[in-house]
Image (spheres, rainbow, N blue to C red):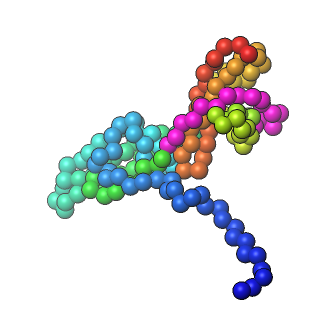
């Protein structure tokens, strides 16, 4: 045996997939779908009839859950399409740094310091004014496909 230490640079998580397959014909409105590599919330689904050569097609209109951009895709209804694993987690807001990052308290008592303030102006001003007034704020963080963003805010009263 050699005396060398082997170091592996691993960027992967524990093998958990960011998406799972689902038949296109079973995806419904208000569900989630991956369109053009982005996790989207489905706002409209229409299915065309089977044509001369077979497949019925599903036309999806989705809104990117992180950027808010509208995207569309057409998939044969019998084919599988990717569905993102979307999680929502609540954290207590501890601090807002000058460079636009927030410090959040997890349920286990640790801090999470790698999240930026949201780009949505309404939510951004609500967070900043609530924090400036010294209120206890709970932010909801949505995560999907390796991305995270603050998507909602709850006020649980003064500190």
Given the current orientation, which residue lies at the most extreme right position?
98
Q: Position of residue 26 (x, y in %)?
A: 29, 46
View extreme (bottom): residue: 1
Q: Decide whether residue 50 is among the magenta residues.
A: no
Q: Residue at x 59, y 58 (%)?
A: 13
81 sits to left or right of 56: right
Extreme residue toward the front, this view: 1
Quadrant where the image shows the N terminus = bottom right
Evaluate whether residue 109 shows in this view.
yes
Identify the residue shown where x is 60% and y is 31%.
90
Frontmost residue, 117 versus 13: 13
Quadrant in the picture for the C terminus? top right
> Would you say 52 lies left or right of 114 here?
left
Whether residue 75 is visible = no
| Percent of width and height locating residue 15 | 53, 60
Nearer to the camera, 6 or 53: 6
- Image position of 29 (left or right of 155): left
Image coordinates for residue 56, horizontal then vertical, percent: 23, 53
**Rendered position, 31 above or below 77:** above
Residue at left 50%, top 43%? 86
Relative to 140, is 79 above or below?
Answer: below
Main secondary structure type of the part rendered in magenta: strand
Q: Total marks drawn?
A: 0
Magenta region: 86-101
Identity of the residue drawn at 73% across and 38% down: 111
Name the spot of residue 46 as percent of width and height, x first.
29, 42
Q: Is residue 100 magenta?
A: yes
């Amino acid at each position: 045996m050699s005396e060398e230490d082997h170091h592996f640079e691993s960027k992967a998580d524990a093998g958990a997939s960011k998406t799972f397959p689902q038949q296109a014909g079973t995806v419904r409105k208000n569900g989630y779908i991956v369109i053009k590599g982005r996790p989207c919330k489905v706002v409209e689904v229409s299915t065309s009839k089977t044509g001369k050569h077979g497949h019925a097609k599903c036309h999806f209109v989705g809104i990117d859950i992180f950027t808010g951009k509208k995207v569309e895709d057409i998939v044969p209804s019998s084919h599988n399409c990717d569905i993102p694993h979307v999680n929502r987690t609540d954290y207590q807001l501890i601090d807002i740094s000058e460079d636009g990052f927030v410090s959040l308290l997890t349920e286990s008592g640790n801090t999470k310091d790698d999240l930026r303030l949201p780009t949505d102006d309404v939510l951004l001003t609500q967070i900043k004014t609530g924090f400036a007034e010294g209120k206890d704020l709970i932010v909801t963080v949505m995560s999907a496909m390796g991305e995270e963003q603050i998507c909602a805010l709850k006020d649980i009263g003064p500190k």
